[in-house]
Amino acid sequence: MTDKNVLGELVALLGSDIVKGPDATLLEKHTHDYCVHGRTDVGVQALVFPRSTEQVSKTLRYCNERGIAVQPQGGLTGLAGGAVPIGPCVVLSMERMRAIKEIDTAAGTITVEAGVAMEAVQKAADAADLFFPLDLGGRGSCQIGGNVSTNAGGNRVLRYGMARDLVLGVEAVLADGTVIDALRKVIKNNSGYDLRQLFIGAEGTLGIITAVVLRLFPKPRSTCIGICAVNDYPGVLDLLRRARSGFGAQLSAFEVMWPDFYQLGTVALGRKPPLEIGHGVYVLIETLGTDPDGDQARYETVISEAIEAGVVIDATIAQSQREATELWAVRDSPGEWSKGVHWPQLGFDVSVPTGEIGPLADEIGVALKKRWPQLQSVFFGHVADGNLHVSVRMSGHSIPELDIENEVYGIVSQRRGSISAEHGIGSLKIPFLHFSRSEAEIELMRAIKRAMDPKGILNPGKVLPAPGSAGH
Ligand code: ZN
């Protein structure tokens, strides 16, 4: 079948406003995500920009009947290559499905189409005096359908959960074009299998999410934030216990930065460090509460008690929104590394139980240094979620990525952790899936894939390893 047939037939089906040919500008934009630069010559046959669920359904029915691969795309901000075409396909971009359909203040829900930017959901909730807590660096350009399809995490998982925990209802289109309308606004629904979860975190391999019902929360009236220095990882755990019992449900972020990361996020970028360099570990603690005066006083009390107990060595607490922003900027500095200090060459997003994060960081650091003495690594993470990020680089060398990945994932595997805590599998991490999923688990995933997408047209080559390949 030639490109022209597919393009022509899709144009006849949906119109030239919806279906575009693979011109150079469109190919350049639609063949990469934040981390993976794909090739523009893989054989994209057409790009479809539907405005309705019905048009998504028609596109899938057409492609399924002809066995044409479909590459779903959201805001192209993913970190694992999940939206990057790797072979002949039709690109299905959700960017025009941007309707905010309803906010239900009694139910505490917002119903939106998949192409709505995360930030637009946050703003719509805010305008209704409510709060949508999912948040990450790409908020302005990432799309909610992509956030849900990849089960995005971020900095407030500790309190509000991952994307999965914020989704009450889903509308999705199956490979054959069948529309599954499960846009329900109820928290309790024990009527059989939880079908929405099949689509969440599946990276578009089981169906295309076209709309979602998301949970909203009361808008916080106060934000308290500070950075504490502690001596070591046992001190971090002690501080976490104190923060949990002192702040209760108001604790919204507990972000740990090891010294090399802290140095990189401050002085290396020309930023004055909020606390001096040289401490064992740094922890950013944020609370979101309902009583501006009382919450700040309580925050200061909990931190003072930790100082008196000798757990916290030094601390700084933001007294203004500007200071709060400055403290978050240190934790969010990875977004600036590519400009200022040329990090990272290789990043990791792994998880183990919270108590093991410190030992895991030590073990990875020692193992990498032993095999590659010239390698530099920095560690940081959402420790309360058991989530560690590691970034490594080797100056002046091309980095032996595969060897380093096998080393790190081998260590994570021994602790029964996950090789992808919040970034997904996409194409990048398929070779390592077996480190955190058993053969039986992978076979069950394959069985679900076969049942829902028997021709394998949905985002082929993503999430699951080909049978018999290195990933099992
Ligand atoms: Zn993260």
Image (cartoon, grey):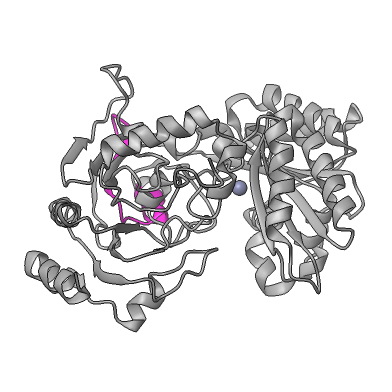
User: Quick check: can you spot residue 290?
Assistant: no
Q: Horizontal and vertical percent for residue 271? A: 77, 66
Q: Is residue 164 above or below residue 405?
A: above
Q: In percent of the image, x 25 and y 62: which residue is there?
A: 96
The answer to whether residue 467 is visible is: yes
In the image, residue 61 above or below residue 468: below
- Residue 415 screen position, x and y as percent: 71, 30
Q: Position of residue 198 (x, y in %)?
A: 35, 34
Residue 351 lies left or right of residue 39; in this view the side is right
Nearer to us in this view, 16 or 288: 16
Q: Quadrant of the N terminus?
A: bottom left
* 166 lies left or right of 469: left
Depth check, front residue: 303 or 458: 458
Count of labels in the image: 0
Q: Residue at x 39, y 36 (%)?
A: 446
* Residue closest to the far left: 12
In the displayed structure image, the side of residue 120 where residue 453 appears, left or right: left
Residue 406 vs 291, above or below: the answer is below
**Residue at point 80%, 36% (across, down):** 358
Q: Position of residue 218 (x, y in %)?
A: 43, 34
**Residue 414 versus residue 265 in the image, above or below:** above
Residue 201 inside the magenta-drawn segment: no
Residue found farthest to the front = 468
Q: Residue furthest bottom?
A: 24
Q: Is residue 402 left or right of residue 116?
A: right
| Magenta part of the chain | 104-124
